[in-house]
Amino acid sequence: MKFVFLILHIFLGVSGTILATIALHYSIVNNTGKMIRFAFAEFVATSLALLAAALYYIIYYQDDKHIIISGKLPMAHSVFMEVKEHSFILFFLLSLYFQLRIKFTDTTDTISFKKETEMVFICIIFLGLLMSAMGIMVNMGFRVNQ
């Protein structure tokens, strides 16, 4: 079951990053309707990825943490996992912020809304890529020590 949570977390996190990229594309080409739909799909994927990660972290990570810390690459936990945990919160909060922004404000194609939209998606994409790289480092720290 541990690997189901891990695979779900990875798949949904990467999917969220891809969906944010598609939403950014639709924002750039001024298709607000499609941008909002892809932004919502990104929010759902990000929320489910956060849930899968939280379940893995609560149930299984303590055992894996000891393997990583006592092995050849302890920085995989002390640096990359710690940063990844905090980055994922920002990833989720940016996604949530954008959904609330769409829900409670005017989404007409004003210059400020378009710039804000593009900046939020660029941040989500950057964080998604950063977290993927850190996830690889954490996984490598675990695999090297088995």
Image (cartoon, rainbow, N blue to C red):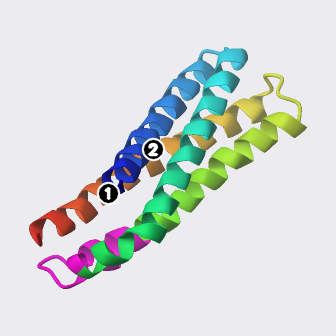
Residue pictured at 25% horizontal, 55% vertical: 136
Say which quarter of the image contains residue 40. Answer: top right
State which region is magenta: 67-82
Asked if disc 1 and disc 2 are in contact, CB closer than 8 Å, the reply is yes
In this rendering, the answer to whether 87 lies above or below 48 is below
Q: How crowded is mark 2: few (under 14 residues within 10 Å), some or many (20 or more)?
A: many
Residue pictured at 73% horizontal, 48% vertical: 97
Q: 94 or 50, which is in the foreground?
A: 50
Q: Mark 2 points at which residue?
A: 13
| Residue 102 point in image, percent of width and height | 80, 34
Residue pictured at 36% horizontal, 52% vertical: 6
| Magenta region includes residue 143 | no
Q: 135 or 50, which is in the foreground?
A: 50
**As drawn, is 54 to the left or to the right of 92?**
left
Q: Name the residue under label 1.
A: 135
| Magenta region includes residue 68 | yes
Say which quarter of the image contains residue 131. Answer: bottom left
| Residue 99 point in image, percent of width and height | 74, 39
Q: How crowded is mark 1: few (under 14 residues within 10 Å), some or many (20 or more)?
A: some
